[in-house]
Image (tube, grey):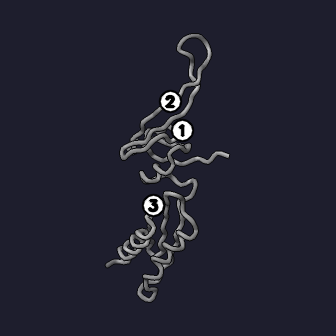
């Protein structure tokens, strides 16, 4: 079993004990620096990171292979990568950059396995007469069209 396979097996075992957590990314450098990024349905606490770190670190032998380990939560400004992340952010505002280069600021209305639905308001010229009116826009956007989606925080 390779070092990476062993790390992945230990991560899966640690995450199995905390089903509300899920793995976003794991990388192992040539110098055996392990970086793990987690997210959770209800966020990720410091204790969650410590528990997953222990699940990996205490089951690897430093005599066999020296390594360093970083376990962190996905940051506020981190792009969404998994459907599960989109689902936990329903109702929140997103900034979505599409593959075609368009930038959309909208609320995440709904999520399924193929697409997300965004809603936002815009000022457009009236159909009849002069002036502008506020209209609600709705867009179904397939994941294949999303280059990057980031949850925005409003104060």
> In the image, which disc is placed on residue 106?
1
| Residue bearing mark 3 | 24
Residue at x 51%, y 35% (from the top left corner)? 119
| Residue bearing mark 2 | 137
N-terminal of the pair, mark 3 or mark 2, is 3
Whole-number angstrom distance, CA of label 3 to CA of label 2: 31 Å
Quadrant position of the N terminus in the picture:
bottom left
Is disc 2 in contact with disc 1, using a CB cutoff of under 8 Å?
yes
Residue reaching furthest bottom?
A: 63
N-terminal of the pair, mark 2 or mark 1, is 1
Picture layout, residue 62 above or below residue 18: below
Q: Position of residue 32 (x, y in %)?
A: 45, 76
Residue at x 43%, y 64% (from the top left corner)? 19
* 13 to the left or right of 70: left
Q: Position of residue 42 (x, y in %)?
A: 52, 58
Whole-number angstrom distance, CA of label 2 to CA of label 1: 9 Å
């Amino acid at each position: 079993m390779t070092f990476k396979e062993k790390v992945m097996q230990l991560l899966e075992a640690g995450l199995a004990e905390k089903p509300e957590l899920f793995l976003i990314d794991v990388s192992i450098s040539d110098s055996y620096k392990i970086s793990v990024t987690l997210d959770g349905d209800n966020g990720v606490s410091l204790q969650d990171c410590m528990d997953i770190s222990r699940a990996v670190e205490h089951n690897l032998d430093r005599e066999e292979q020296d390594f360093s380990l970083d376990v962190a939560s996905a940051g506020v400004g981190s792009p969404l990568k998994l459907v599960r992340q989109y689902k936990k952010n329903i109702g929140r505002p997103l900034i979505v950059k599409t593959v075609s280069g368009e930038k959309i600021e909208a609320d995440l209305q709904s999520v399924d396995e193929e697409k997300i639905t965004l809603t936002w308001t815009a000022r457009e010229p009236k159909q009849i007469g002069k002036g502008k009116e506020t209209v609600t826009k709705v867009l179904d956007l397939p994941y294949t069209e999303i280059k990057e989606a980031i949850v925005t925080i409003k104060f």
